[in-house]
Image (spheres, rainbow, N blue to C red):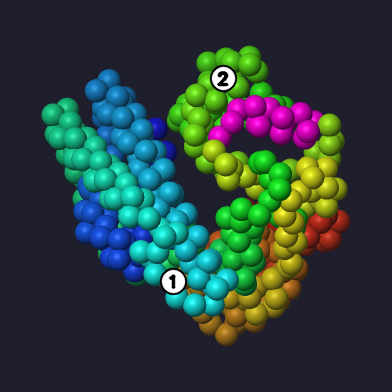
Amino acid sequence: MPEAVLSFVSVILNKILSLAADEVSRVWGVKKDLEKLAEEVQMMEALILDAEGKQSTSKAVQLWLKRLQSIARDAEIVLDDFGYEVLRQKVENRKRDKVRNFFSSSNPISFRLEMANKIKNASASLEEAYRRANQIGLHPVQLPMTSADHKEDRWTDPFVEESEMVGREVEVSQVVSMLISSDYKKDLPVISIVGMGGQVERLLNEMLQSLKGKSADTTNRETLVKELQDNLKGKRYLLVLDDIWNENRQKWDGMRRRLLAIGGASGSKILVTTRSDEVASAMQTSGLHHLDILSDDHSWMLFEKLAFADGGARKTQDLVDIGRRILKKCGGVPLAIKVIGGLLYSKKDASEWLKLEKSEIWNESANNEGGVISVLMLS
C-alpha cells in the first residue's frame, strides 16, 4: 500500500504545483493556499517512506495510510474541479481569440470562494494527518531529492505531461472544446476519439470504485445502480472508456440507459477512445475526432525528450543516427515511440541501441496494426 499511496500523493503534488504556477491561482487569491498545500503534501511523502517499514507490524500505521489515501482522493477532486475550470477558461479564450477576465460572469465569485475553502479544508486534513503520524511514531524520512527541487520539471499545463503533448496541442484543444460544449441535443452525449492506441456490472463497479476508493460489496446490478445514484446525485461527471472494441449497438444502448437512470447533473459526458470507426458509430457518437500519426519532427521531439532526458543516454551523433532509424520503425505511433524512448533511456552504449534496431521484433510488428503490440513486448 505505501507504494500506491506514495504514487498517488506524488500525482497530487504535481497537480498542486502546476496550478500554483498558473496565473489564475494568483488572480483567484489561492496561490498561497496552494503553495502551503504543496508543502504539506511533501511532508506526507516523507512520512509515507517511514510508514513503508512499519505498516506490517502496526495496525495504527495501516489505518493512517488508508486515511491519508482518502484525504488525497478528496484533494484530487478539488484540484480536478479547479483544473477543469482553468482549462475551460483557456479554451474559451482561444476560441474567442481575446483575453477574458477571470472575474467575468462565466467565473462567479462563489466558485472561487468555494475552491478557496476546499483547498483550505484539504490543508487542514493534512495537518491533522501529520499530527496523527507523530502520535503513532512516524517520522519524516529524508527524500533523496525533494519534490521542491524539481519545480522546474513539473507540468506546465494542468494534468498533462509535456512529453505527452508533443504534436497534440491543437487536437487537445479540439477535444476539450467538444467536452465543454453545451450544444449537444442528447442527454449524456458520447465523444469518441478514434486512433491507434464489458460487462455492465463491471463498469458500474469500476465507477463506484473510482468514486469511493473501494470496490462495491455486491455484483447485483440494481444495488450498484442505487449506490451510484446516491454518489452522483447532483454531480456532473465524465466517464472515460479507454480502448473500446465492442461494436454491438444493443449492448451500448442498454449501458447508456443504465447510465441515464443513474442520473448526474446536466453536462455529464462519456469520452470513448477506440481504434474502430464502427465502435464510434455503434455508440451514436455526438462528437468525433480522428487522431493522426505524429509527423517526423514531432516523433523525434517526443523520442528525444524520453531517450535523452537527464540521467539517460548521452546525446551523441551515433545515438542520434541510430535513434532516427529506430524511430522510422515506430510509424509515428506515440505509444510505440514512448515505449522505445523509455527503453533506450537506460541504454548508454551504442551497441545496445544497434541491438534493438536489428531486433526481430520489428519483423513481427509489420503483421499487426502500427506495430504497437510487438513493440510493447520489448519493454
Image quarter of residue 132: top left
Say whether residue 154 is magenta: no
Q: Could you tell me if residue 359 is visible in this image?
A: no
Mark closer to the observer (1, 2): 1
Q: Nearer the viewer, residue 179 or 110?
A: 110
Label ID, residue 226: 2
* Range of magenta residues: 251-264
Amino acid of disc 2: Lys
Q: Is residue 201 above or below residue 124?
A: above
Identify the amino acid type marked 1: Arg
Toward the viewer: 362 or 224?
Answer: 224
When the figure is inspected, residue 96 is found, relative to residue 270, above or below; the finding is below
Q: Residue at x 61, y 53 (%)?
A: 182
- Looking at the picture, does residue 241 appear above or below residue 170? above
Q: Residues within 10 Å of mark 2 (few under 14, many from 20)?
A: few
66 on left or right of 297 = left
Instruction: Give the camera-side residue of 8 and 307.
Output: 8
Can residue 262 be found in the magenta stretch? Answer: yes
What SS does tag 1 mark? loop
**Percent from the top left, x then y, of residue 14?**
38, 56
Which residue is tagged 1? 100
Say what secondary structure mark 2 lies in: helix
Decide if residue 357 is in sight here. yes
Horizontal and vertical percent position of residue 129? 22, 35
157 over 364 or under it: above or below? below
